[in-house]
């Protein structure tokens, strides 16, 4: 994002979508028109390094909002997929599918929490290191 709040790549895409082309960078500045193109975009909500996107750019698209499914829905989805994959196996294996699905989802939650704790811990260590350096620097003055 520049000093005026403009995101240059998005400004370029907005121009390409609105004008359906652009000028050639050569001496003649010939118009290069685009035909038969479909544009698809996806984005996450702002935060964690992602910025708001210009609403004038978003207005060029049909917008669909999809929320993350509930845990019960995820269980049903993953359990159905795994059930389909184990159909050729014996009944004993097929009976383990609900337990495998539940354990996998719990493992994912544990790994996700661990990764957040690790990131937070590293940030704290970095801040602690900077404070220690500042303290040592002032002590030597």
Image (cartoon, rainbow, N blue to C red):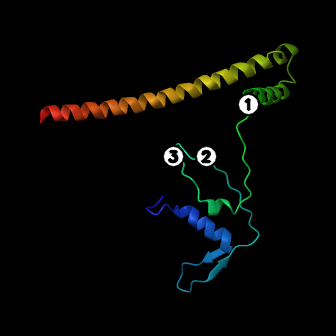
Q: Where is residue 120 in the image (x, y as percent from the top left)?
A: 46, 30
Q: Where is residue 7 in the image (x, y as percent from the top left)?
A: 52, 61
Vertical position of residue 84 compared to residue 17: above or below:
above
Q: Position of residue 101 (x, y in %)?
A: 74, 22
Instruction: Look at mark 2 in the image and give the residue it sits on.
Output: 45
**Residue depicted at 54% across the width and 81% down the height:** 26
Instruction: Look at mark 1 in the image and give the residue it sits on.
Output: 70
Q: In which quarter of the image is residue 107?
A: top right
Viewer-closest of 140 and 47: 47
| 3D distance between C-alphas at marks 1 and 2 | 18 Å
Provide the secondary structure element on which disc 2 rests. Answer: loop
Provide the secondary structure element on which disc 3 rests. Answer: loop
**Residue depicted at 23% across the width and 35% down the height:** 134
Give the mark nearer the N terminus: 1 vs 3. 3
Tell me the mark number nearer the camera, choosing from 3 and 2. 2
| 3D distance between C-alphas at marks 1 and 3 | 25 Å
Vertical position of residue 140 compared to residue 11: above or below:
above
Viewer-closest of 7 and 79: 7
Instruction: Look at mark 3 in the image and give the residue it sits on.
Output: 49
């Amino acid at each position: 994002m520049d000093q005026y709040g403009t995101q240059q790549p998005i400004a370029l895409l907005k121009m390409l979508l609105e004008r359906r082309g652009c000028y050639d960078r050569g001496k003649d500045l010939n118009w290069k028109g685009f035909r038969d193109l479909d544009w698809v975009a996806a984005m996450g909500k702002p935060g964690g390094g992602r910025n708001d996107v210009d609403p004038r750019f978003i207005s060029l698209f049909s917008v669909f909002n999809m929320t993350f499914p509930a845990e019960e829905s995820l269980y049903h989805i993953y359990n159905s997929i795994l059930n389909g994959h184990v159909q050729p196996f014996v009944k004993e294996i097929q009976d383990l599918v609900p337990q495998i699905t539940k354990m996998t989802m719990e493992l994912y939650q544990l790994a996700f929490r661990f990764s957040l704790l690790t990131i937070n811990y590293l940030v704290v260590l970095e801040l602690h290191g900077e404070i220690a350096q500042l303290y040592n620097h002032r002590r030597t003055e």
